[in-house]
Amino acid sequence: MIQSRADQELAASVIKEFNQAAALRGNFETHWQEIAQRMIPNEVAYFNAFNQQRSQGEKRTQFVFDSTAANALKNFAAILDSLLTPRNETWHQIQASDPSLNKRRDVQLWMEEVNGLLFKYRYAPNANFASHNQKNYRALGAYGTGTLFIDELTREKGLRYRYIHLAQIYFMENHQGLVDRAYRYFPMTARQAYQKWGDNCGPEICEKAKSAPDTQLQFIHCVKPREDLDVTRSDYRGMRFVSYYISVQGQILLSENGYNTFPYAISRYEQFDNEVYGRSPAMDVLPAVKTLNEQKKALLKQAHRIVDPVLLTHDDGVADAFDFRPGSINAGGVSAQGQPLVHMLPTGNIQAGKETMDDERKIINDAFLVNLFQILNETPTMTATEVMERVKEKSILLAPTIGRQHSEYLGPMIDRELDLLARQGMLPPMPRALIEAQGHYKMQYSSPITRSQKAEEVAGMMRTLENTINIVNATQDPSPLDNFNFDKILPEVATIQGVPYHWMNSVEDIKKIRDQRAQDKQVQQATQVAPGAAAMISAQAKQTAANKQ
């Protein structure tokens, strides 16, 4: 297929934008390379070589002598996964932005059903969310930046997730500091490219697909806000973001499409002014990691000298003829007075080396939150009050990290998921009240760490109620309880604790129960009063009869 001049200029423009984005992160790439060599040796990424291909099976552990940092990074990813997105829990709920709508039973049930669909398709086997989300958390701990690509399945309805390594993704922010441009630079073989784009690849790639199908070529996927947006159109030109696939070889526009929502969920662990990419715990402790590796090298040398010591002898000694086999007898090894003529070279204090290594390990484990979660295991005899205080401390220390992941990573990811499910017609009909409110919603996160952060509200309420009940029991005056509105307290406590909506009665159901209870009470009171009333009527009748006589 012959490219038009406009398409050629567009492809050249995208490649120029990509080169500008790539030029801005040279210092980061050097930093990332050092971290990858020492903490993820099996996934060493050559950030400064534009994904140049390396030989399969090559040795990548030459920089690693101590595995503390690599293990701490794995633990860090597992900690974030269990705290933010635990697979066996419902870690978020959808709510209407208007608080009054959240009191409507139809809106509550619709939100709960949609929330269930999100978890159903997100954790479906072919979605591959769990494994790629874990990779994203590991990248967050190592490089400070993680990227997850969310799209729909091609052959069936559903969602599909893919972790994008930082060596392939380049992005830029808008004036509000939000990532709105992404350039993915990735390799494909000529055969794969032809399978995906066909004759749009151009004559050169098409020829390579036949003559040298395994030739590696480079491509760019560009996603950015559409400048010529036409909201009246229903095709990709009416979508907020434009999608271009470009072949670097020949500068060919392979395809143009669009997205309603940004398809890359990009998260950053910590971000500083005038920097687009994030910074990580690994960056903070990289000096400690390097020091620990050098200490381990020295310790191994010293341990080797202890196990297989260096011998010191006189020039006329007998060491050359020594037999080092077990049970051997070496004549001449001692003097006539029994003093040894062969000595070992002093090796120094190996215990001091272990202690300094432990200091570096503690710094590394602290940075990756490992020690923070060993407290409960190391002190199992803590009281319930002490446990609550520990949980509170964790919540305070992790609050900045959790907040950023909610706003930068999980929030945009859920927006993207809802958009894809809606486009595939997989969401139930929206209640009229929610349609009139234009479907505005917000996320209520209920992961373990979020619940622990909000647990203080519930604990404070329970302590206050307990004290109030003590006052009521002491004074026999129930009026202090009038300060509590339990019809507001209990639903909010249920929300904080992550109780499903359908487990709770609606306002109408509660009114019916209370009306029935009041009616039953009236019947009971009437039944209790009836015998006395009948006796009084009988007595009055007898008295009336006696008066007439």
Image (cartoon, rainbow, N blue to C red):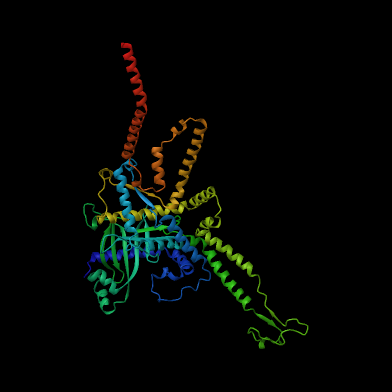
Residue 226, visible in the rendered structure: no
Task: For the C terminus, give its image quadrant.
Answer: top left
How many discs appear? Answer: 0
Viewed as shown, does residue 390 lie left or right of 25? right
Residue 107 lies, in percent from the top left, at 30, 45
Residue 204, visible in the rendered structure: yes
Tell me where residue 306 sits by quadrant.
Answer: bottom right
Q: Going 29% across and 74% down the picture, which residue do you hit?
A: 190
* Residue 217 against residue 112 in the figure, above or below: below
* Residue 304 against residue 155 in the figure, above or below: below
Viewed as shown, does residue 167 lie left or right of 419? right
Residue 396 lies, in percent from the top left, at 49, 50
Residue 54 lies, in percent from the top left, at 40, 75
Of residues 239 and 27, the one nearer the viewer is: 239
Residue 150 lies, in percent from the top left, at 33, 60
Tell me where residue 276 sits by quadrant.
Answer: bottom left
Q: In the displayed image of the protein, which residue is found farthest to the right?
A: 337
Q: In the displayed image of the protein, which residue is found farthest to the front?
A: 549
Q: Going 25% across and 57% down the picture, which residue do you hit?
A: 424
Task: For the N terminus, give its image quadrant.
Answer: bottom left
